Every structure is written in C-alpha cells, then in structure tokens.
Image (tube, rainbow, N blue to C red):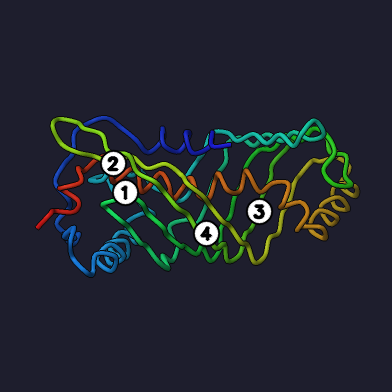
Amino acid sequence: MWCVILGIVLILFGCGDAKELPSYLKLCQRRDPQLHQCIMDNVQILKPKMKPGIPELYIPPLNPLVIPEATLNSGSSFRATFKDIQLYNAHEFNLQSFDVDLDKYHIDLKILFPLLRIKSLYSFNGRLLILNLNGKGPADGNYTNVQVGLSLNGKVFKKNNKEYVSWEKEKIDINIEKINLLFERLFGDNTELNDQTNKVINNNIDGIVEELQPVIQEVVSGFVFSLVNRLFSRFSLNELFPPK
C-alpha cells in the first residue's frame, strides 16, 4: 500500500551531509514549553517557499509533485493502476496541530488541504461497485477540504557520529468534504457512454472513494510523511532541536 510513499521518498531524498539550518528558520529548543508553537511557526515560514522549491533543504518544486505510479487491487474483482500522478496545491495546506514527543519519538499532526487536484493516467480492469470498467486514459480529480490526521513513530540512527531520526507511519485518517472525478476514455471514443459513466461515478462518489481510499491515502499522506522525513534526514536531532 505504501509504494507511493517510497516513490515520493526517492524523489525528495538525495545524497549529502547535513547543512546548517537556514537563517530564516527559528531555532526550537528541545525542552522549550512552546516547542509545538515554534515548529508551527517554522512551517508557516516554509509554506510560501514550497511551491518553487527550497534548494537549501533539498526540496524540489512541489506544485505539482509528480509520483511515478500507484496500484490498487480490490480482491480479485478490480485492479486500478495510476501512472504519472501529479498532485497540485498541496503546498497550500493549513497545519492545524503538530504535537511531537522527542523522548518517545512520536509525532501527531492534523492538516487541512483546502483544495487538492490530482491528475494521472489510469488503467481500470474489473468491476467497481455496479460498474464494469476496462478502460485507460487521463484522470482528473478535485478534492475539497481534505482533512488528514497522521501519526508517525521515529527510530534513531547514527550518521557521522550524530543522531538522526527516521519516521514511519503509525496510522492515518482522511476525511474529504467533496470530490469530483473525471475519467476520460472509459469506453474509448464513445462520448455519450463516457459521460454517463462519469455521472454515475460522481453520483455514487462515497462508494467509489471507499474503494479508491488506499490510493488517496498514499498520495496525500505520502506528501506529509516524506517532507517530515526529508527534514529529519538532513539535519541531526541536536541541530533541529538543541538540548539547550
């Protein structure tokens, strides 16, 4: 299920040793009672820089963020493959809460994406709810007010005699207020049947999204997960959060 996250990590991770934190970031003391607020302040500083990319943090432009491929298998009845996935507007997120326990290496965060657009090339084979789908072509989706709750557990590792933390997903919850999907060429050049099928899909969007939920989770949470790991892989724990 987490193959997309691996793809994002490969995109965002690079080689090289840790550098000094950029001067425009606040230095958050590990034992600061306001540590959570300090972190959230830094996120707000970074947000406007994410769209064009942040070279000093080795983060490429993030609008769109391109993910090579994701595959969904729903038992033996349905298989979906999405390639060249392009995630738009993720940089416009609102960080609602960020709780970190650096003694237990645990992060809980809540984040809201007001509007996400996900474009891809799809391939469907099998039965999805009441629909028999065996087509391929461009896909486009708008996702309004995507609420994400994500928990991460960390593991300490050493590099160049410094302690770093890598993060893994513990759990994720996603709620989406509104979704509109468009799949082109579901039935080749039969425009009328394509339009009718897309109408059925959007009229039964709750059931469709339940089936596609694993892919949505991978794409959305992978964005958050890999950015957190990106920062912690480049800078040691003491560089990010000095003990004093």
Q: Would residue 224 appear left or right of 240 to someone viewing this image?
A: right
* Sooner in the amino-acid sequence: mark 1 or mark 3: 1
Vertical side of 221 occupied by 69: above or below: above
Please state which amino acid type lies under the numbered disc 2. Val
What is the secondary structure assignment of the residue under circle 3? strand
Q: Would residue 100 appear left or right of 164 to someone viewing this image?
A: right
Vertical side of 3 occupied by 206: above or below: below
Name the residue: 15% across, 47% down: 238
* Sooner in the amino-acid sequence: mark 4 or mark 2: 4
Disc on res. 105? 1
Vertical side of 108 occupied by 161: above or below: above
Name the residue: 18% across, 33% down: 17
Please state which amino acid type lies under the numbered disc 3. Gly
- Which of label 3 and label 2 is nearer to you? 2
User: Mark 2 — residue?
Assistant: 165
Distance in Å between CA atoms under marks 2 and 1: 8 Å
Residue 24 visible: no
Q: How many marks?
A: 4
Distance in Å between CA atoms under marks 4 and 3: 18 Å
Distance in Å between CA atoms under marks 4 and 2: 22 Å
User: Mark 4 — residue?
Assistant: 148
Query: From this viewpoint, which residue is outermost toward the front?
Result: 104
- Which of label 1 and label 3 is nearer to you? 1
Distance in Å between CA atoms under marks 1 and 3: 35 Å
Name the residue: 31% across, 50% down: 104
Q: Are marks 4 and 3 in contact (CB under 8 Å)?
A: no
Q: Quadrant of the N terminus?
A: top right
What is the secondary structure assignment of the residue under circle 2? strand
Percent from the top left, x then y, of residue 173?
Answer: 56, 56
- Which of label 4 and label 2 is nearer to you? 2
Distance in Å between CA atoms under marks 4 and 1: 20 Å
User: Mark 3 — residue?
Assistant: 141
